[in-house]
Amino acid sequence: MYRSLWRVGLEVIPNTVPHGTMPFVGGYAVEDVVGGFSHPYDTPRLVERLNADWYDLAVSSGLFDHRREFLVKLPQGTRTHRNVLQHMHSGSDVPSVWTRVRLLQRWDIMGRGAASAFFGVHAGHPGFGMMALDSSVYIVASTGEVVSMCSRSATRTGCCGFWPGQSRRVESGWHRS
């Protein structure tokens, strides 16, 4: 797994997830959404645009610390993102774990990352969750009719994190072409 993440441009920092990190991010309120974007699949140079927009969103929302470190949600054990999707739609729960990583100088989250077993289905079709080390920001990417991503901030409303039951439908106003 570490080698796959290295190829994406992420250095794994083993056994260093901050104590007290929320184990599950399951909901949010509309007012917690602080940014996001979406692109149709026929967007020219889709992977490049997704990478640029992901980085801009990560920086502007505060995903990274001063060392460019953050958490990524990975399927536990040998499961891949595709396995997670299959189990999610079958009603069975697939455990996942937070892993601390550092963004390297050369990275490709939406190309090699989405094509890897951990961040999507294939290049330009991402599916992942990422969180700031202090649990204040959560970024989620999903693939449906379009590629979409949004950033949610726990500090915006003064709460200490996200939890199930807080979920409401996100208004379409955060989309950007």
Image (spheres, helix red, strand yellow):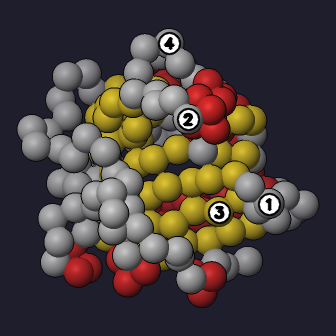
**Mark 3 or mark 2: whose residue is earlier in sequence:** 2
Q: Which residue is mark 3?
A: 148
Asked which secondary structure carries label 3, the reply is strand
Q: Nearer the viewer, residue 64 or 42?
A: 42
Which disc, if any, is residue 104?
Answer: none
Q: Which residue is mark 1?
A: 145
Quarter where residue 20 is shown: top left
Q: Which residue is mark 4?
A: 78
Q: Amino acid at mark 1?
A: Glu
> As drawn, is 133 to the left or to the right of 86?
left
**Mark 2 or mark 4: whose residue is earlier in sequence:** 4
Q: Which residue is mark 2?
A: 91
> As drawn, is 61 to the left or to the right of 143?
left
Q: Amino acid at mark 3?
A: Ser
> As drawn, is 74 to the left or to the right of 163?
right
Can you give x and y, in whole percent of width and height, for residue 21 in the image? 18, 44
- In 3D space, how far apart are the residues under numbered discs 3 and 4 (Cα atoms)? 26 Å
From the image, state whether disc 2 or disc 1 is nearer to you. 2
- In 3D space, how far apart are the residues under numbered discs 4 and 1 (Cα atoms)? 28 Å
> As drawn, is 55 to the left or to the right of 100?
right
